[in-house]
Image (cartoon, helix red, strand yellow):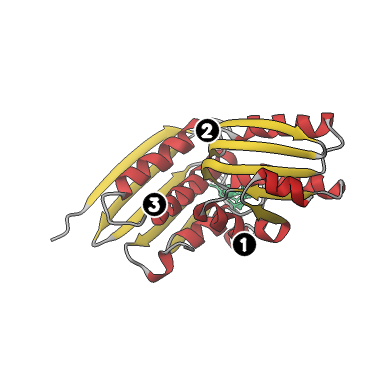
Amino acid sequence: MHYSFEIEGQALLATLEGELDLHTSPEFKEEIITIFETHPQIKYLIINVQGMSFIDSSGLGVILGRYRELQTRGGKLFFVQANPQIKRILQLSGFQKISEFANSANEVLERI
Amino acid sequence: MESTNWIKLEFPSDTRNVAFARTALALFAAQLDWTLDELEDIKVAVSEAVSNSIIHGYQLQEGIVHVHASHSNQILKITIEDFGQGIADIEQATETGYSSIPEERMGLGFTFMYEYMDEVQVISEVNVGTKVTMFKRVGHPESHGTN
Ligand SMILES: Nc1ncnc2c1ncn2[C@@H]1O[C@H](COP(=O)(O)OP(=O)(O)OP(=O)(O)O)[C@@H](O)[C@H]1O
Ligand SMILES: [Mg+2]
């Protein structure tokens, strides 16, 4: 699992690569929570999942936790480059109702 | 005549073994003729059941997870068993959105297992353990992806 973060104004762009599961999600969770805490201006979370090969409920739980924080900040959640498999699990877990899909981070940055 | 085959794995409740188990099971399952989406579905189901044994069954403490898989006549059968806490109310546990640790988890593991496999059976007893058995048939009408 590799991930990187970039802050663009009120948006946090997170790029996830590899497998987000029970083993890999705690470290990712800790880091993204720290970024939220140290950057109270963050209102938009844009997650690029193009390179993500696997996610299950442990990984989705971390993302839901950040969505809840975004809600208290009046923000929004976006997924960039979700393949059909990832779209399906996001749909099953109700994320398609609370987030938006996009083809690129720039597209989102123009939208917000 | 299709031959029957099976594997058996045992490993400690180390979170690294979740990826090991789903990858090993996908390799075994690949002896049958699935679509790529179906193989991904099997990986998610195994990941959820093994994660549950580690998180809930063994409360992230020491324990051994047993995995058995077999296929026969185009039907894959996977059993994941722990000898941990057990589940008091299986009906409640398998409800979508129910989690005994709702501040951390979404309660979707069982939902994914039911969605991605054709059939799921749960046998559990408090302080004895939990056994989840899942079946998936090749070419089953329910088991194709969204695309
Ligand atoms: N192997 C197990 N041993 C003991 N309890 C279990 C086991 N598997 C599941 N449970 C119980 O069933 C509940 C529901 O499981 P499920 O996988 O659907 O959700 P979760 O694990 O709580 O959350 P998520 O899977 O979304 O991370 C768990 O919260 C737990 O109480
Ligand atoms: Mg679970």
Q: Quadrant of residue A30?
A: top right
Residue type, label 1: Glu
Work out which residue is located at the far bottom of the displayed protein and give it: B141
Q: Is residue B109 left or right of residue A72?
A: left
Q: Can residue B37 be seen in the rendering of this structure?
A: yes
Q: Quadrant of residue A46?
A: top right
In 3D space, how far apart are the residues under numbered discs 1 and 2 (Cα atoms)? 25 Å
Q: Which residue is mark 1?
A: B95
Q: x%, y% of residue B22?
A: 42, 42
Q: Does label 1 point to a residue whose CB lies under 8 Å from ligand 1?
A: yes
Residue type, label 2: Thr
Position above or below: B114 against B30: below
Q: Secondary structure at mark 2?
A: loop
Residue name at image x 42 percent, y 64 percent: B144
- Circle 3 crowding by C-alpha within 10 Å: few under 14, some 14–19, many from 20: many
In 3D space, how far apart are the residues under numbered discs 3 and 2 (Cα atoms)? 21 Å
Q: Which residue is mark 3?
A: B39
Q: Chain of mark 2?
A: B
The numbered dot on residue B15 is: 2
Nearer-N-terminus badge (1/2): 2
